Amino acid sequence: MTYRTNLVAGSSLALFSIVYFGLSFEIKPFSGSGAAPLNSAFVPRLWGVCLFLLSLTLIARAFRERKAQLQSGELAAREKKTFAGVVKANYEVILTFLVIMLFIAGLKPIGFTIMSALYIFAQVLILTPPGKRKLHWAIIVGIAAAVIIDYVFVALLHVMLPRGILGF
């Protein structure tokens, strides 16, 4: 992985985490069935901060790699990259952002459990190498994870999630 890849990924994630953290302030506080020190906005804000810190780590790694390449003389002349080449080299990242946007768009009308199952299914297929993809395992993982997550949040933590068109 080149330093440019880490720099672009880190910068993109930093920007995304800042927007995500800012949008977390629009979450209406819901403390569940009782008064607790944590509310429904705590975890999204925590994730936003963690994602930002991890993106800073990627950016720092990029600068360290660039410095090492400059010192060793490995830094080659800039390669001319086409848009299609960049998309092909980063299709997992691009597809992940598209799937996240679809997840967010469908969350309220379709519901948390269904959208989570679809998102996890799609993400498993995106991140699994093409030769090792097994559709039935992606379906099982997507459904099982969505049901477990829904149970934990609704039954155990008493957090209301978007129910959607089918009521679950």
Image: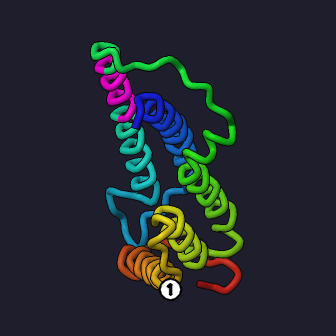
Report the predominant secondary structure element of the magenta stretch: helix
In the image, residue 55 sits, relative to residue 156, either above or below, namely: above
Residue 117 horizontal side relative to residue 164, left or right: left
Residue extent of the magenta highlight: 58-68
Instruction: Tell me which colouring the rendered structure shows.
Output: rainbow
Number of disc labels: 1
Residue at screen point 39% across, 42% down: 49
Residue 20 magenta: no
Q: Which residue is mark 1?
A: 136
The spot of residue 55 in percent (x, y) is: 40, 37
Say whether residue 136 is left or right of residue 164. Answer: left
Q: Is residue 126 left or right of residue 50?
A: right
Viewport quadrant of the N terminus = top left
Amino acid bearing label 1: His
Residue 34 in sight from this viewpoint: yes
Residue 53 image position (x, y, % from top left): 35, 37
> Can residue 154 be spotted in the picture?
no
Q: Is residue 106 above or below residue 62?
A: below
Q: Position of residue 120 (x, y in %)?
A: 51, 70
Instruction: For the C terminus, give its image quadrant.
Output: bottom right
The structure residue drawn at horizontal position 33% and vertical position 26%, both measured from the top left corner, is: 65
**Which residue is more in the foreground, 110 or 33?**
110
Q: Residues within 10 Å of mark 1 (few under 14, many from 20)?
A: few
Choose between 121 and 45: the one closer to the eye.
Answer: 121
Q: Position of residue 141 (x, y in %)?
A: 44, 79
Q: Secondary structure at mark 1?
A: helix
159 or 84, which is in the foreground?
84
Q: Is residue 66 part of the magenta span, yes or no?
A: yes
Quadrant location of residue 110? bottom right
Q: Residue at x 54, y 50 (%)?
A: 93
The residue under the point 39% across, 29% down is 59
